Image: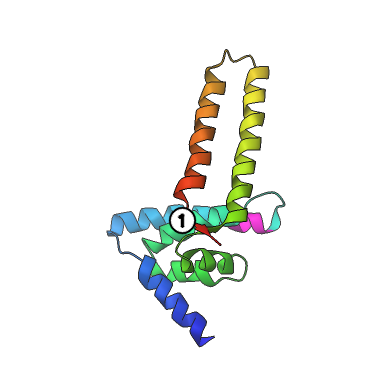
């Protein structure tokens, strides 16, 4: 337990930042909104939880250390967030692969729906470009953990 607290203190020390009172209020407000969405995801099947908690934790890390600590230690998604921050904001290879698969599937569905809706090709091209950027970013810019 003491080791976990030491690790928590090290993570908070590394990522927590101060901001101006105006920015702090804005970041906490948006972070609380994201946190509400994350809490909804605990009970609603298919609604993401950690996907909302990660930006909430980031916003709290630059505005409110107490809320940042809470996001890293709560019983619902704290362990996942703590692991993400403690390993230097990395993702396991299998998670990156699944993210790219889901991006590809959703982009293909979006391109198909846009085609069915009668778009002359601009929407499909835009979706394809965003898909390429997303897959490139996940595969090359997000650090992989073994």
Residue 19, image x and y in percent?
29, 60
Q: How is the image coloured?
A: rainbow
* Within-10-Å neighbours for mark 1: few <14, some 14–19, many 20+: many
Task: Tell me the residue at 61%/48% (across/down).
Answer: 97
Q: For residue 37, say whether it is visible.
A: no
Residue 3, image x and y in percent?
50, 84
Element class at badge 1 = helix
Q: For residue 90, say whether it is visible.
A: yes
Counting labels gives 1
Magenta region, main secondary structure:
helix
Quarter residue 6 falls in: bottom left
User: Is-magenta flag for residue 77?
Assistant: no
Residue 21, image x and y in percent?
29, 59
Quarter occupied by the N terminus: bottom right
Quarter residue 20 falls in: bottom left
Q: Which residue reaches farthest bottom? A: 2
Q: Which residues are magenta?
A: 37-42
Question: Looking at the picture, does residue 38 appear above or below residue 14?
Answer: above
- Reading the image, the residue beneath label 1 is 31
Q: Which residue reaches farthest left? A: 20
Task: Tell me the residue at 57%/65% (across/down).
Answer: 80
Question: Looking at the picture, does residue 24 appear above or below residue 74?
Answer: above
Question: Looking at the picture, does residue 28 appear above or below residue 112?
Answer: below
Return the residue nearer the eye: 49 or 8.
Answer: 8
Q: Which residue reaches farthest front? A: 146
Task: Tell me the residue at 56%/68% (across/down).
Answer: 78
Quarter occupied by the C terminus: bottom right
User: Is-magenta flag for residue 38?
Assistant: yes
Residue 74, image x and y in percent?
57, 70
């Amino acid at each position: 337990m003491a080791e976990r607290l030491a690790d928590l203190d090290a993570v908070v020390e590394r990522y927590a930042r101060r901001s101006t009172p105006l920015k702090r209020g804005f970041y906490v407000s948006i972070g609380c909104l994201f946190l509400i969405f994350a809490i909804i995801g605990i009970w609603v099947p298919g609604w993401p939880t950690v996907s909302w908690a990660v930006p909430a934790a980031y916003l709290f890390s630059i505005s409110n250390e107490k809320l940042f600590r809470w996001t890293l230690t709560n019983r619902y998604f704290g362990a996942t967030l703590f692991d993400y921050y403690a390993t230097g904001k990395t993702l396991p290879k299998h998670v990156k692969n699944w993210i790219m698969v889901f991006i590809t599937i959703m982009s293909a569905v979006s391109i198909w729906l846009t085609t069915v809706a009668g778009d002359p090709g601009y929407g499909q091209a835009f979706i394809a470009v965003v898909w390429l950027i997303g897959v490139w970013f996940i595969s090359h810019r997000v650090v992989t953990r073994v």
